[in-house]
Image: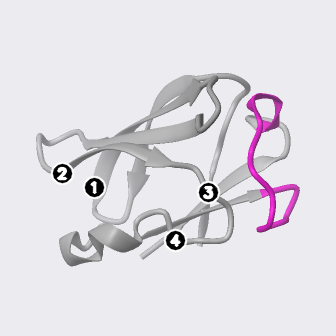
Amino acid sequence: MIQIPLTSGPQTFFIGLGDYYWQITLLYRDSDLGGWSIDMERTDDGERIFGIPVICGVDLLAQFQYRGIGHLYATVDGRYDVKPTYSDMGATLALYWEE
C-alpha cells in the first residue's frame, strides 16, 4: 500500500501508481453536499476519471475495478468514519493506493 503525499488546499500533482503515471487533481466544493473530489488522468492519454468524491471507509475506485486501476482509500487522522473537511487536506487527510 502506498501513501500518496498531499499538501494543504486544492492541488494537482503527478505520481506513479502501478505501471502508469497519473495526474491527480484534488478539488474542494464548498456546498451542502460538496467536499473533496479527485480527478485522475493517466499521462499517456489512457484512463480518465473525474469527480470521485473523497469518502472515508470505502474503496474510492471500486466502481472502476474492471479497468484495473487499483484501489484508493481515504482516512482522516487514521479514522474511516468521518467526512474530510477543507482543513484536513495536507494535515490529517491521507490517501492510500494499492494494486
Cα distance in 3D space between marks 4 and 1 = 19 Å
Location of residue 17 by image quarter: bottom left
Residue 59: mark in rendering: 4
Query: Which residue is situated farthest in the left direction here?
Result: 45
Q: Could you tell me residue 62's position as x and y percent?
A: 40, 73
As drawn, 3 above or below 57: above
| Residue denoted by label 1 | 20
The span from disc 1 to disc 3 (Cα, nearest Å) is 24 Å
The amino acid type found where label 2 is placed reads Glu
| Badge 1 amino acid | Tyr
**83 relative to 80, above or below:** above
Residue type, numbered disc 4: Asp
Of the numbered discs in the image, which one, if any, rests on residue 47?
2
The residue stretch that appears in magenta: 76-88
Q: Is residue 70 in view? A: no
Asked if the stretch drawn in magenta spans residue 44, the answer is no
Q: Position of residue 28 (x, y in %)?
A: 59, 27
Q: Residues within 10 Å of mark 1 (few under 14, many from 20)?
A: few
> How far apart are the two marked residues, 4 and 2, measured between alpha carbons?
18 Å
Spatial CA span between label 3 and label 4:
9 Å
- Counting residues from the N terminus, which is met first, the one under dot 4 or under dot 2? 2
Residue at the disc numbered 3: 55
Q: Which element is circle 4 on?
A: loop
Mark 2 vs mark 1, CA separation in Å: 10 Å
Q: Quadrant of the C terminus?
A: bottom left
Q: Secondary structure at mark 1?
A: strand
- Residue 99's label in the rendered image is none
The residue carrying pointer 2 sits among few (fewer than 14), some (14 to 19) or many (20 or more) residues within 10 Å by Cα, namely few
At 29% from the left and 75% from the top, the residue drawn is: 65
